[in-house]
Image (tube, rainbow, N blue to C red):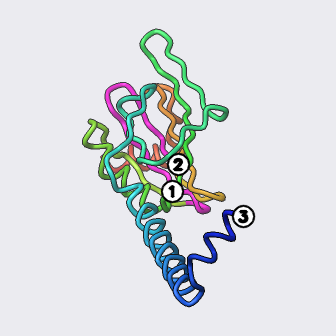
């Protein structure tokens, strides 16, 4: 307490209060500017490295949710279900995957937006990659990689229509 009293006598209120107010305002401005920039940049920067799934990118700043993820490799086939969470918007993350998956050799097959979920479907070699992106108190990304043979079959109406157009 004595130290504080000595310091307060040295700093005159006429000088100290305006300086402290200016520093507080400057600090708030820096914090406000810094937070907005990081959120916008998160999904547009280079992909983060995922050691468990090297050929599927993850937006920088997204955190791996180990308790909601699993993967398995059996006889040359892999079954992956990874969950990530981050601060970028659904639109930014979707654009991130549209740009970065082809760079790693994935070909986009399908894209849809249903009930607030953006879904992207890619294939590469013998694998199919399903990516779902949605907002639920933070943006969630679910990446599923499955062997091609485990994909759902086309509905009968679509298969019949495809047969008549040939």
- Whole-Å distance between the Cαs marked 2 and 1? 6 Å
Compare marks 2 and 1 and give the one earlier in the sequence: 1
Crowding at dot 1, Cα within 10 Å, few <14 / some 14-19 / many 20+, comes out as: some
Q: Mark 1 points at which residue?
A: 118
Q: In this view, does 41 lie to the left or right of 26?
A: left
Q: In this view, does 18 lie above or below 32?
A: below
Of callouts 1 and 3, the N-terminal one? 3
Q: At 57% from the left edge and 39% from the top edge, which residue is drawn? A: 83
Q: SS at mark 2?
A: strand
The dot on residue 2 is: 3
- Picture disc at residue 1: none
Q: From the viewer's perspective, is residue 158 above or below residue 50?
A: below
* Tag 1 secondary structure: strand
Asked if the residues shown at circle 1 and circle 3 are in contact, with their CB atoms under 8 angstroms apart, the answer is no
Question: In terms of secondary structure, what is the magenta stretch mainly?
Answer: strand
Report how far apart the C-alphas of labels 2 and 3 lie in the structure: 60 Å
Q: Give the range drawn in magenta.
A: 114-132
Question: Mark 3 or mark 2, which is nearer the start of the sequence?
Answer: 3
Most distant residue in the right direction: 1
Residue 43 point in image, percent of width and height: 40, 55
Residue 17 rendering spot, x and y as whole percentages: 57, 84
Residue 93 position, x and y percent, is: 44, 55
Residue that mark 2 sits on = 132
Q: Quadrant of the N terminus?
A: bottom right
Task: Give the answer, above or below, for where 119 lies relative to 159.
Answer: below
Instruction: Give the residue at the far top of this rendering.
Output: 75
Residue 152 percent coordinates (x, y): 53, 36
Mark 3 lies on a secondary structure that is: helix
Q: Compute the Cα span from label 1 to label 3.
A: 61 Å
The answer to whether residue 104 is magenta is: no
| Viewer-nearest residue: 115 or 92 | 92
Q: Are marks 2 and 3 in contact (CB under 8 Å)?
A: no
């Amino acid at each position: 307490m004595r130290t504080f009293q000595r310091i307060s006598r040295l700093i005159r209120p006429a000088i100290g209060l305006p300086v402290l107010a200016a520093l507080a305002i400057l600090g708030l401005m820096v914090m406000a500017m810094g937070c907005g920039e990081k959120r916008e940049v998160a999904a547009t920067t280079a992909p983060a490295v995922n050691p468990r799934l090297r050929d599927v990118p993850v937006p920088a700043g997204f955190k791996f949710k180990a308790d909601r993820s699993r993967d398995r490799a059996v006889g040359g086939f892999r079954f992956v279900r990874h969950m990530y969470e981050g601060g970028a918007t659904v639109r930014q993350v979707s654009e991130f995957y549209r740009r970065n998956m082809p760079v790693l050799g994935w070909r986009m097959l399908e894209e849809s937006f249903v009930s607030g979920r953006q879904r992207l479907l890619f294939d590469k070699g013998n694998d199919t990659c399903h990516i779902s992106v949605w907002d639920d108190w933070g943006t969630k990304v679910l990446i599923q990689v499955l062997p091609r043979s485990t994909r759902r079959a086309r509905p009968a109406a679509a298969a019949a229509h495809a047969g008549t157009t040939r």
